[in-house]
Image (cartoon, rainbow, N blue to C red):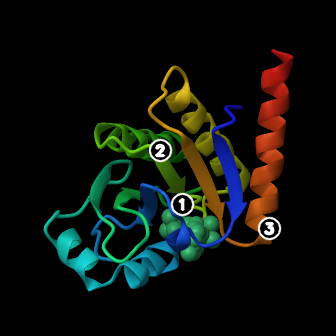
Amino acid sequence: MDSRITLVEGDITRQRVDAIVNAAKESLLGGGGVDGAIHRAAGPELLAECRTLGGCPTGEARITKGYNLPAKWVIHTVGPVWRQGGANEDALLTDCYRSAFALAARHGIRSIALPSISTGAYRFPIERAARIAFSEAEKHLAGNDQFKSVVFVLFGAKAYEIHSSVHARLAGSARER
Ligand code: ADP
């Protein structure tokens, strides 16, 4: 795996990076989980800017300023709700990461922090989501020197452990190739 990809356990709202990614709802009008935490930390101006965007379909992304956050930007993407795997969930989650990285690239963002999209209220199986997240990050970084750091911020010890073992497995299988 690309050494610019790292994992930390913590709260994404505290990350000192150019952009943090939000696992938002289609309305972009705030919610629970990481979305609620980001809105609380950024302050009410974030919601005011989100209201001007007119929502965001699942798999796409939108960018706003970070207001009171240490991060300058927030990239809002809408993950799929897990429906037993028959509703294009893998492709939609892939699209989220792809859309977020594409927006970041267009805005000259060099460091980005991401949560584990869809694995909270939207119930996407966490290992499966981690594989998608890492492989999309890896694809995006290949041949791209704009990004200096991609930090996956895992909320809680269990999420961190699961992501670490998926990361180690992917790194191991990449070495064997
Ligand atoms: P979704 O609706 O996409 O599932 P959630 O916010 O419910 O979004 O959960 C997405 C992931 O974000 C979960 O793994 C959850 O544990 C994690 N999470 C919640 N709060 C934070 C936070 N402050 N920083 C980073 N990750 C968080």
Residue at 53%, 56% in the rendered image: 114
Residues packed near mark 2 inside 10 Å, few (<14), some (14 to 19) or many (20 plus): many
Indicate the amino acid at tag 3: Lys
Disc number at residue 118?
1
First reached walking from the N terminus: tag 3 or tag 1: 1
Report if residue 31 is visible in the image: no
Residue 168 placed where, x, y %? 83, 41
Disc number at residue 97?
2
User: Callout 3: helix, strand or loop?
Assistant: helix
In the rendered view, tell whether residue 166 sits above or below residue 21: above
What residue sits right under mark 3 in the picture? 158
Residue 151 placed where, x, y %? 60, 52
Residue farthest toward the top in the current orientation of the protein: 177
User: Callout 1: helix, strand or loop?
Assistant: loop
Residues packed near mark 3 inside 10 Å, few (<14), some (14 to 19) or many (20 plus): few
Residue at 60%, 73% in the rendered image: 11
Q: Is residue 114 left or right of residue 175?
A: left
In the rendered view, tell whether residue 75 sits above or below residue 95: below
The CA span between labels 1 and 2 is 11 Å
Where is ligand 1, by quadrant? bottom right
Indicate the amino acid at tag 1: Ser
In the rendered view, tell whether residue 141 sits above or below residue 25: above
Q: Nearer the viewer, residue 175 or 147?
A: 147
The CA span between labels 3 and 1 is 16 Å
Indicate the amino acid at tag 2: Tyr
Q: Nearer the viewer, residue 48 or 95?
A: 48
Residue farthest toward the left in the current orientation of the protein: 52
Residue at 51%, 63% in the rendered image: 16
